[in-house]
Image (tube, grey):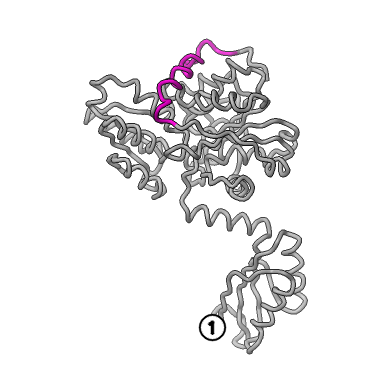
């Protein structure tokens, strides 16, 4: 894509990003950039991953927080800082404030994952849980800021924050200058705004694509902006933002070619694929870039695609459930419900047949009293691990020749 329309109205310049890089260098990790041949085989594209999930707080968000806090005056530092965040920005502000001895209060939505709350508290910040989502938490933060005189560190809609996030792109281009496509998650728009600013200045030939999750797809009719969002729960809570920042939009609206929207299931599959194929733990928001590539193989085939894994702060239980759900959808875990005669030896026979066909029984549940249609029968629920979808089908076919079964 040609960025001939690089905008003079942008609140952030390449110099702002370069200055931010020097300013935050002592506290921010220069994260690795890796090629992933395993993902190339799946997608048909050459995939480069920028591992922001390896930052000290597990997210790129600390870059912007570090730059903004570094620019505070002594008087502002004495007043303390406040931020509203679903988790990653919260940790970035808390860590940077801790390093500089600044008092910090963080307002988080009530249903923020416990891992993110605990991680933020570990840096000494005061946590206030308020509101159902980021928008409501932001309202509480605004009130507390006015009451206590603190300085607000916005998670995205601040030129200093956007410039900090843009440092990701400087490192990416140094490590992998031959990319032709960049795919970036969109929450508030700070990461995309910062990265697009750098690409427009240094590599205007690179096509830039934004990605939103279906429940918060305010740009699903791009270039039209501000479409109403459905809202609600999402595995990509890190980009669950109802309205983008105006500074962020001004930073990228003329520099990107399109916005792709991914579903919850596509994000779940991307989280699983990153764990299996790239050996990377990634939260839902951080996996949306790969989700877009996996969901649009014809568009990306043959391209040299860079994707920032923007965060890795996913609850262990959510990660485990996400992987299991993906395996069930892929057919690599088979959950079968049997109607069997209630007599000795049946369970052993079923297990033997599964084993003979190379399946692995990982869970069994036996119901006699209420689930079965007859007092003379029992319901057996068996979860089976298979090599792949075809292998699962073979096991199911063999068992169906001997028992009444249905797939759950």
Answer left or right for 34 relative to 230.
Answer: right
Looking at the image, is 99 positioned above or below residue 252?
A: below
Answer whether residue 392 is magenta in the image: no
Q: Position of residue 377 (x, y in %)?
A: 63, 84
- Residue displayed at 32% across by 44% down: 121
Q: Position of residue 270 (x, y in %)?
A: 61, 45
What crowding class fits label 1: few (fewer than 14 Cα within 10 Å), some (14-19), or many (20 or more)?
few
Q: Quadrant of the N terminus?
A: top right
Q: Which quadrant of the view contains residue 227?
A: top right
Visible in this render: residue 246? no
- Residue displayed at 77% across by 76% down: 401
- Residue displayed at 65% across by 68% down: 384
- Residue displayed at 63% across by 31% down: 306
- Span of residues in magenta: 6-28
Disc 1 secondary structure class: loop
Q: Quadrant of the C terminus?
A: bottom right
Q: Position of residue 88 (x, y in %)?
A: 42, 38
The residue identified by callout 1 is 369
């Amino acid at each position: 894509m040609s960025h001939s329309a690089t905008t003079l109205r942008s609140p952030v310049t390449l110099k702002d990003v370069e200055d931010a890089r020097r300013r935050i260098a002592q506290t921010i990790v220069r994260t690795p950039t890796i090629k992933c041949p395993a993902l190339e085989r799946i997608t048909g594209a050459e995939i480069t991953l920028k591992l922001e999930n390896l930052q000290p707080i597990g997210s790129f968000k600390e870059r912007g927080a570090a730059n903004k806090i570094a620019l505070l005056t002594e008087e502002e530092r004495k007043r303390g800082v406040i931020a509203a965040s679903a988790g990653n920005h919260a940790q970035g502000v808390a860590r940077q404030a801790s390093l500089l001895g600044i008092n910090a209060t963080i307002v988080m939505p009530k249903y923020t994952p416990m891992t993110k709350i605990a991680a933020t508290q570990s840096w000494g910040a005061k946590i206030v849980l308020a509101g159902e989502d980021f928008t409501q938490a932001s309202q509480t933060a605004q009130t507390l800021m006015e009451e206590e005189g603190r300085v607000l560190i916005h998670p995205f809609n601040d030129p200093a924050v956007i410039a900090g996030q843009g440092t990701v792109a400087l490192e990416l281009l140094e490590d992998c200058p031959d990319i032709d496509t960049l795919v970036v998650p969109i929450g508030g728009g700070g990461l995309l705004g910062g990265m697009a600013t750098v690409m427009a200045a240094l590599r205007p030939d690179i096509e830039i694509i934004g990605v939103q999750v279906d429940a918060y797809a305010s740009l699903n009719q791009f270039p039209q902006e501000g479409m109403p969002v459905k809202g609600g729960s999402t595995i990509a809570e890190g980009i669950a933002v109802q309205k983008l920042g105006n500074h962020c939009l001004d930073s990228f609206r003329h520099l990107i070619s399109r916005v792709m929207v991914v579903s919850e299931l596509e994000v779940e599959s991307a989280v699983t694929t990153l764990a299996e194929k790239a050996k990377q733990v990634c939260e839902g928001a951080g996996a949306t870039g790969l989700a877009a590539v996996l969901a649009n193989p014809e568009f990306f085939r043959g391209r040299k695609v860079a994707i920032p894994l923007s965060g890795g702060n996913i609850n262990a239980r959510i990660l485990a459930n996400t992987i299991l759900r993906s395996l069930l959808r892929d057919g690599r875990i088979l959950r079968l419900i049997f109607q069997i005669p209630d007599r000795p030896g049946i369970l052993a026979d079923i297990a033997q047949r599964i084993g003979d066909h190379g399946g692995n029984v990982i869970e069994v549940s036996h119901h006699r009293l209420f689930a079965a249609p007859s007092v003379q029968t029992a319901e057996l629920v068996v979860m089976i691990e298979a090599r792949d979808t075809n292998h699962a089908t073979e096991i199911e076919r063999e068992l169906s020749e001997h028992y009444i079964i249905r797939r759950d």
